[in-house]
């Protein structure tokens, strides 16, 4: 027998083991890297979810602030409308009082009292007319 044939046959019988070890090493390295990437992606996802919850809290606070401002604006608008209605009523009342005062003055236009005693009936009449 030839030594090279024996050595070649021995090597040929061992090549599958070497190939299996190389393949196992590659699979372990790839699996480890894949697991590390998977873990990294999960950590990034968890951080993103935590950031999202924090931002949702901030958004809820801002939304509550905007709602409070909107309620205040609506309340101010209603108060302004009520004040405008009160102002219109007061203007109408002042107009009516002004007309009564002008009518009372017109009734007393010809009066020329010279003393308090002579003026008191006119003053009383004017006050009753304005009332």
Image (cartoon, grey):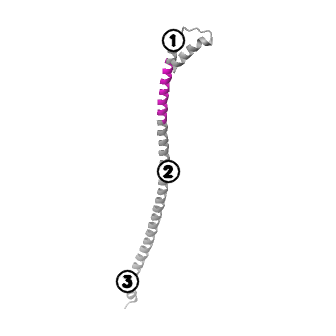
Q: Earlier in the sequence, mark 2 or mark 1?
A: 2
Q: Earlier in the sequence, mark 3 or mark 1?
A: 3
| Picture coordinates of residue 113, whole percent (x, y) | 59, 9
Depth order, front residue of 89/8: 89
| Picture coordinates of residue 40, whole percent (x, y) | 47, 65
On-image quarter of the N terminus: bottom left
Circles 2 and 1 in contact, beta carbons < 8 Å: no
**Tag 3's secondary structure?**
helix
Q: Main secondary structure of the magenta part?
A: helix
Give how far apart the Cα atoms at labels 3 and 1 are. Answer: 140 Å
- Residue drawn 47% across and 57% down? 53
**Tag 2's secondary structure?**
helix
Judge depth for marks 2 and 3 and give the one in front: 2
Is residue 11 depicted above or below 68 in this figure? below
- Residue drawn 43% across and 68% down? 34
Q: Seen in the image, is 113 located left or right of residue 15?
A: right
Label annotation for residue 61: 2
| Picture coordinates of residue 73, whole percent (x, y) | 48, 39
Residue 97 on the magenta segment? yes
Residue 2 on the magenta segment? no
Label annotation for residue 58: none
Residue, disc 3: 12
Which picture quadrant has residue 14? Answer: bottom left
Which region is colored magenta? Answer: 79-99
Depth order, front residue of 63/1: 63
Q: Seen in the image, is 117 located left or right of residue 13?
A: right
Label annotation for residue 107: 1
Crowding at mark 3 (Cα within 10 Å: few <14, some 14-19, many 20+): few
- Residue drawn 46% across and 59% down? 49
| Picture coordinates of residue 99, whole percent (x, y) | 49, 17
- Residue drawn 37% across and 83% down? 12
Depth order, front residue of 56/102: 102
């Amino acid at each position: 027998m030839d030594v090279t044939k024996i050595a070649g046959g021995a090597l040929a019988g061992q090549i599958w083991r070497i190939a299996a070890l190389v393949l196992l090493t590659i699979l372990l390295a790839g699996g480890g890297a894949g697991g590390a990437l998977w873990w990294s992606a999960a950590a990034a996802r968890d951080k993103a979810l935590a950031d999202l919850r924090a931002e949702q809290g901030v958004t809820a606070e801002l939304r509550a602030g905007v709602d409070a401002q909107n309620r205040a604006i609506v309340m101010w608008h209603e108060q302004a409308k009520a004040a405008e209605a009160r102002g219109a009523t007061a203007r109408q009342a002042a107009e009516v009082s002004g007309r009564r005062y002008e009518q009372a003055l017109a009734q007393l236009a010809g009066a020329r009292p010279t003393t308090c005693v002579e003026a008191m009936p006119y003053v009383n009449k004017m006050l009753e007319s304005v009332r």
